[in-house]
Image (tube, rainbow, N blue to C red):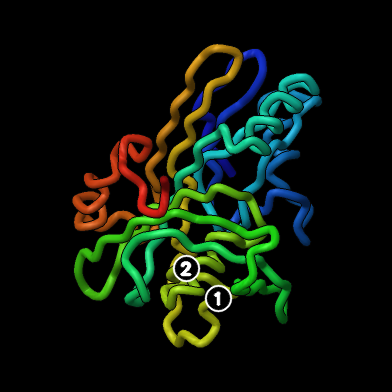
Amino acid sequence: MYTLIDENKDFFVIDKNQGVDFHTSVDGESLINHVREMEKEKNLFPVHRLDRMTSGLILFAKNKQAARGLSLLFQNRQIEKYYLALSDKKPKKSQGLISGDLERGRRGTWKLLRTKVNPAQTHFFSKAYGDGLRLFLLRPLTGKTHQLRVALKSIGAPVLGDPLYCRGERKKYDRGYLHSYALRFDYMGTLYCYVSLPDNGIFFKDERFGATLENFKEPWLLKWPGTA
């Protein structure tokens, strides 16, 4: 279900496999229970989550004090999160800010509105690399349900293989191509920086993907579009 990336007295950093439910699924399996069992940590506290189709980096706190501290960092936007996504559609714009309120739609979907009362905000870059495919580097400033999936759908480039937002597609893909790529944050006076490449998916393993990703190796050093 996951690969252990790092551990200290306050938290775990793991790389979640795609297709794994965070909470208990119909077959009784869940990521959080599996981590508790494998790492022998009964007191394990989630501070953020990933969708079933999304792979990559995620944090778990080991105690209530750490959970409060890390949750506060997330709330104050002091944890930098970066995601990778692929699409086979050309977006309405190649980089910038996607911002708007989210509203629940049909069959478990969400949609982006033009209003901005409590908006989901996502900065992004994108680069094409052949065969109609495009790599997106995404930096969400908020943590709304399906935020990144809805953001890309709103600019005409839904995530490749997304079972909810690519329903009109006839092709079937081996996974949903969204990956939690990097985390960077200061915790208790120490700067932590984690980067994890996706390790499965035909298009994530393509040599051209790796070559294009060289543009985004240290995402925190980039001059992000849409920022002041």
**Where the N terminus falls, by quadrant?**
top right
> Callout 1: 10 Å neighbours few (<14), some, many (20+)?
some
Of 15 and 68, the residue lying toward us: 68
Of 61 and 145, the residue lying toward us: 145
Q: Are marks 2 and 1 in contact (CB under 8 Å)?
A: yes
Residue 197 makes an appearance in the image = yes
Amino acid at dot 2: Leu
N-terminal of the pair, mark 2 or mark 1, is 2
Q: Which mark is residue 68?
A: none
Query: What residue is drawn where x is 56% and y is 73%?
Result: 163
Query: What residue is drawn where x is 22% and y is 45%?
Result: 214
Residue 18 on image: x %, y % = 53, 54
Q: Is residue 77 above or below residue 112?
A: above
Question: Residue most toward the front?
Answer: 228
Q: Which-is-in-front pick, marks 2 and 1? A: 2
Query: What residue is drawn where x is 54% and y is 65%?
Result: 149
Residue 13 on image: x %, y % = 56, 30
Of 29 and 90, the residue lying toward us: 90
**Where the C terminus falls, by quadrant?**
top left
Q: Is residue 181 above or below residue 135?
A: above
Which quarter of the figure has residue 65?
A: top right
Q: Secondary structure at mark 2?
A: helix
| Left or right: 36 in relation to 216 | right
Tell me the CA gap for discs 2 and 1: 9 Å
Query: What residue is drawn where x is 24% and y is 50%?
Result: 210
Residue 84 makes an appearance in the image = no
Q: Is residue 41 above or below residue 92?
A: above
| Left or right: 172 in relation to 34 | left
Amino acid at dot 1: Tyr
Residue 224 on image: x %, y % = 36, 47
Q: Which residue is mark 1?
A: 165
Q: Which residue is mark 2?
A: 152
